[in-house]
């Protein structure tokens, strides 16, 4: 016969294991006409843990043009660029709350226009 403590432990494990997994956070920038220059997508980790961030570039039809995954330490930034003549926007996907990062795009080199991800 199982003890009450053993039954309680099994019940607690079942509750924990049946909890839904946390969904990934996804942020998007507005789209921008890159013209004959490049688009940089940047992310700053303002959380207290390292984040793995996937950066996707899309054209205006929703087709993925490029993908990059960067590991960003707390208090650090990562930057990835795409060169081409396109209308583009960036998507940032990561595990963590939406306030864990600051993300944006930058058009041109040096930067001539920016757009914040939300």
Image (tube, helix red, strand yellow):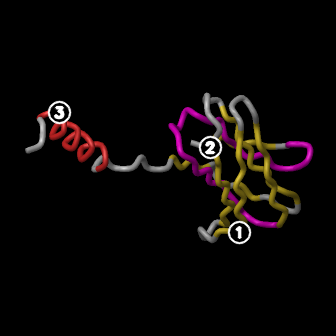
Q: Position of residue 100 (x, y in %)?
A: 58, 34
Task: Look at the numbered disc 2 and give the secondary structure of its residue.
Answer: loop
Within 10 Å of disc 2 (Cα), the crowding (few <14, some 14-19, many 20+) is many
Labels 1 and 2 touching (C-beta < 8 A):
no
Query: x%, y% of residue 83?
Result: 84, 62
Instruction: Name the residue carrying label 2.
Output: 117
Q: Quadrant of residue 76?
A: top right
Placement of the C terminus among the 4 image quadrants: top right
Would residue 111 be found to the left or right of residue 3 on screen? right
Q: Residue at x 17, y 36 (%)?
A: 8
From which residue to which does the magenta span run? 85-111
Q: Residue furthest right?
A: 110
Let me know if residue 60 is in the magenta part. no
Q: CA distance from mark 1 to mark 3?
A: 55 Å
The residue that disc 3 covers is 5
* Residue 107, placed above or below residue 7: below
């Amino acid at each position: 016969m199982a003890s009450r403590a053993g039954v309680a432990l099994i019940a607690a494990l079942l509750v924990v294991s049946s909890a839904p997994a946390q969904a990934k956070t996804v942020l998007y920038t507005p789209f921008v006409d890159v013209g004959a220059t490049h688009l940089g997508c940047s992310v700053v980790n303002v959380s207290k843990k390292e984040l793995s961030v996937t950066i996707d570039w899309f054209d205006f039809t929703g087709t993925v043009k490029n993908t990059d995954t960067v590991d960003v330490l707390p208090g650090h930034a990562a930057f990835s660029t795409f060169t081409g003549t396109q209308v583009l926007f960036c998507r940032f996907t990561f595990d963590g709350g939406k306030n864990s990062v600051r993300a944006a795009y930058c058009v041109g080199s040096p930067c001539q226009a920016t757009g914040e991800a939300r």
